[in-house]
């Protein structure tokens, strides 16, 4: 059965979010001023909170049974790990010892998560 226009639009929007946050992580990596880093980190965190909420409340439930449950469960756990880092970043400042490291680890987690999300294969009918 072909995808509906709405389903395609939702996937396109999620992928656009992925590209946008990847761009912000790259800008953070190049930033040198603390104020600039804090602004970029705040943008990254805000986008990821909204994005993960949409995925968890709408997208993932709609995918149940269409992708392997283990992959879906892994996505929820990855979101939980990202939420911990997001909270730590939000509660800290660029001058703090682990600020840049937290953002870098969050970027690596999100890169892994996006790669898996965008290459998932549907469950084979059977």
Image (tube, grey):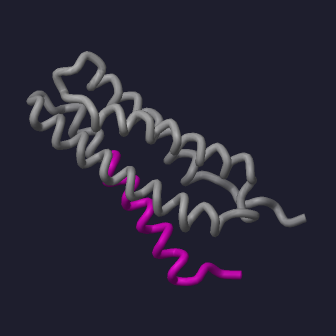
Q: Percent from the top left, x then y, of residue 89?
A: 30, 33
Residue that sits furthest to the right in the current view = 126
Residue sitting at x 33%, y 53%: 47
Percent position of residue 69, x then y: 74, 52
Q: Percent position (x, y) of residue 19? A: 36, 53
Image check: 33 left or right of 75? left
Residue at coordinates 51% horizontally, 81% vertically from top-left? 6
User: Whole-percent x and y of residue 60?
Assistant: 60, 61
| 110 is higher (above) or lower (below) than 95 | below
The answer to whether 51 is drawn above or below residue 95 in the figure is: below
Residue 102, quarter of the rendered image: top left
Q: Is residue 77 left or right of residue 92?
A: right
Residue 66 picture quarter: bottom right
Pick the quarter of the image with the N terminus: bottom right
Is 19 a magenta residue? Answer: yes
**Where does the C terminus fall, quadrant-wise?**
bottom right
């Amino acid at each position: 059965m072909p995808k509906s226009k709405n389903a395609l639009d939702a996937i396109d929007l999620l992928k656009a979010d992925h590209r946008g946050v990847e761009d912000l992580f790259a800008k953070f990596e190049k930033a040198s001023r603390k104020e600039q880093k804090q602004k970029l980190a705040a943008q990254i965190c805000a986008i990821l909170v909204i994005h993960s909420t949409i995925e968890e409340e709408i997208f993932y439930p709609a995918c149940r049974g269409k992708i392997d449950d283990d992959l879906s469960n892994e996505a929820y756990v990855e979101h939980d790990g990202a939420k911990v880092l997001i909270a730590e970043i939000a509660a800290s400042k660029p001058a703090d010892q682990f600020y840049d490291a937290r953002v870098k680890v969050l970027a690596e987690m999100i890169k892994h998560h996006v790669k898996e999300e965008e290459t998932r294969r549907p469950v084979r009918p059977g």
